[in-house]
Image (tube, grey):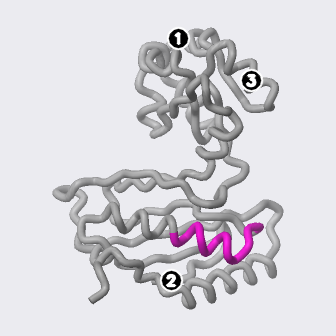
């Protein structure tokens, strides 16, 4: 008897759909690089009663290469960020915002994610208020010993599953310039991780679709 956690994604169906999806995207070339999204429908789950899960997993390939990460840095990190052409903000920049909700919200909208130096991360609530947290973008920690570009790439490789009130969720699992195999590997990692978060594993999965930004959904489960 196959266990409930074992992957029920059928490789051939998934591969065929990835082929089809890339073909359609290729026939209707867009002026931008389309992202591939995994859309998940859940069942036998009550967001009111059941635990609302959240979890992050690192995919083998970066799903959104143009995702922007901003460094909230101490002097050393700001220096490194400047050299690496990575956007950054200093303590002074943060102080200037004076906890202004509108400014903090604007900052949260401008970037996809944040990394903060050790010295700064504890000060974020005091400097900025709860704005970044509310936007679900509280910074990750950037240790002095870590390589900044590697850490930024790691963040770009990470996707987050978070159940709110609705029984459907979507995450980026790739883009149309990756190979079929790379997309296949990314989707497998994402799906198997998501299933491990669910109370009844595969019994909670109603449907799985993949689609490009502008394309139609392809059902893979």
Disc 3 designates what residue?
80
Report the Cα–Cα distance between label 3 and label 2: 43 Å
Local SS, label 3: helix
Label 1 close to label 2 by CB (< 8 Å): no
Question: Which of the numbered marks, if any, corresponds to residue 98?
Answer: 1
Q: Which x, y percent locates residue 74? A: 62, 15
Foreground pick, 92 / 107:
92
The image quadrant where one finds the N terminus is bottom left
Which residue is at 66% across, 45% downward?
153
- Sequence-wise first label, 3 or 2: 3
Q: Nearer the viewer, mark 1 or mark 3?
A: 3
Local SS, label 2: loop
Report the Cα–Cα distance between label 1 and label 2: 48 Å
Give the quarter of the image for residue 46. bottom left
- Sequence-wise first label, 1 or 3: 3
184 is within the stretch colored magenta: yes
Relative to 220, say whether 166 is above or below: above
Q: Which x, y percent locates residue 47? A: 24, 58
Local SS, label 1: loop
- Sequence-wise first label, 1 or 2: 1
Magenta-drawn segment: 177-188
């Amino acid at each position: 008897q196959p266990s409930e956690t074992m992957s029920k994604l059928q490789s051939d169906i998934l591969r065929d759909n990835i082929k089809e999806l890339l073909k359609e995207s290729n026939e209707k070339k867009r002026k931008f690089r389309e992202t591939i999204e995994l859309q998940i429908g859940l069942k036998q789950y009550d967001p009111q009663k059941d635990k609302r899960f959240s979890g992050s997993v690192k995919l083998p390939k970066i799903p959104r290469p143009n995702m922007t990460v901003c460094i909230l840095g101490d002097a050393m990190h700001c220096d490194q960020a400047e050299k690496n052409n990575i956007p950054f903000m200093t303590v002074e920049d943060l102080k200037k915002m004076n906890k202004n909700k509108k400014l903090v919200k604007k900052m949260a909208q401008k970037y996809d994610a944040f990394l903060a130096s050790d010295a700064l991360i504890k000060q974020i609530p005091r400097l900025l208020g709860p704005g970044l947290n509310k936007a679900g973008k509280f910074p990750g920690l950037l240790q002095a010993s870590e390589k900044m570009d590697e850490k930024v790439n790691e963040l770009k490789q990470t996707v987050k599953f978070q159940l709110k009130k609705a029984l459907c969720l979507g995450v980026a699992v790739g883009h149309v310039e990756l190979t079929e195999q790379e997309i296949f590997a990314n989707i497998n990692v994402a799906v198997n991780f998501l299933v491990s978060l669910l109370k009844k594993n595969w019994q909670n999965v109603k449907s799985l679709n993949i689609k490009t930004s502008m394309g139609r959904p392809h059902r893979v489960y």
